[in-house]
Amino acid sequence: MSGVAMEQKISGNSSREKRPSRKEILEKKKAIEEAIKASSANKDHLASFPSLRHYNRNGLSVYLESGCGDKLSSSLKHFIQSLLKINMEGPYGSEWPSEEKVKRREMVAPEARYIVVHDATANSKETLEMSERGRTNAWNINNNCPVVGFVHYRFTLEEELPVVYVYEIQLQSHVQGKGLGKFLMQLIEIIAQKNRMSAVMLTVQKANSSAMNFYLSKLSYNISAISPSRRFKLDFTVQLQMGYKKSYEILCKILDSEAKAKLEVCTISICYLVIL
């Protein structure tokens, strides 16, 4: 089929589809904004899943608690900054000094939501009792129940869709390789579904090959259509100017069909360019 014929067919199909009215578009936009606002207002997303506050597998016992970025204690902020540097300075390379400044601002934003991971192995009885009460001293480092990792996520808009964006998931080296990272990401997906989000998204440095393999192979994430390597791959000039120089990929786990069309599958215009 020629490019012209395909364009006419696409145009014909589009004209037969009922386009939403301005009122419907505005109502949908308002509903999405309200969903994000309501989700962000929740201070403890783990409250709906009490059984998932604990992880006890592969010789590792931890408990989890929710919190907000603007409530971080100075000790926890120092822990987060230190763990970020240990885990991410290598993958970021020469970009790290400037990126570290950005991350320090992001981590304390009011809209930042956290799941903090406490090691329950050292004092299992005490930490179990605290976690069962639902509220602990999570935002301060306690020697009896040290923090060993965290997830920083937010409810936001991507391509006019409500999504959970995972800003960070960081674990100390001695708790890695025990299934905890997979558990935490699956928990984020459950939280996203509970709050009617369309997708879970995150950014991964290309140099971080182990993280790329973890998300793509073990968790079945995909490189998003809005990732630089996908968005500009059809235009070689643009790719050289923008996409090729980017050191990261944007990954996504799709939770509904609309997100699949916008975040994962190519649009009609891009498909048409391929045909031509």
Image (tube, rainbow, N blue to C red):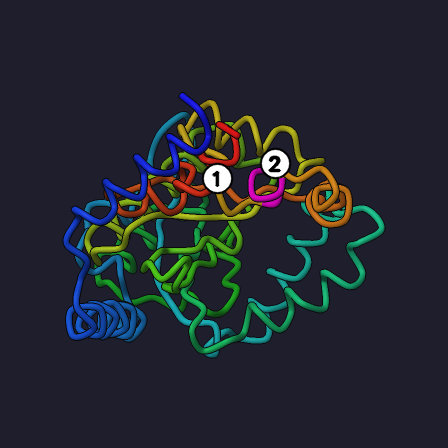
Name the residue located 72 percent from the left edge and 60 percent from the top edge. Answer: 99
Q: Position of residue 259 (x, y in %)?
A: 31, 46
Q: Mark 1 is on which residue type? A: Ile
Q: Please say if 127 is above or below 240.
A: below
Q: Position of residue 235 (x, y in %)?
A: 66, 40
Kindly report the secondary structure that dominates the magenta region of the rendered protein. helix
Please provide the residue range marked out in magenta.
228-232
Front residue of 101 and 34: 34
Name the residue located 34 percent from the left edge and 66 percent from the top edge. Answer: 136
Question: Which quadrant would residue 156 be assigned to in this image?
Answer: bottom left
Do callouts 2 and 1 mark residues in contact (Cβ within 8 Å)? yes
**The magenta stretch spans residue 126:** no
Give whichever of discs 2 and 1 has the lower sequence position. Answer: 2
What number is the disc on residue 270?
Answer: 1
Front residue of 126 and 37: 37
Quadrant for the N terminus, please.
Answer: top left
Measured in 3D between alpha carbons, the distance from the residue under mark 2 to the one under mark 1, in whole angstroms, is: 8 Å
Which element carries disc 2, helix, strand or loop?
loop
Name the residue located 61 percent from the left edge and 29 percent from the top edge. Answer: 210
Front residue of 265 and 31: 265
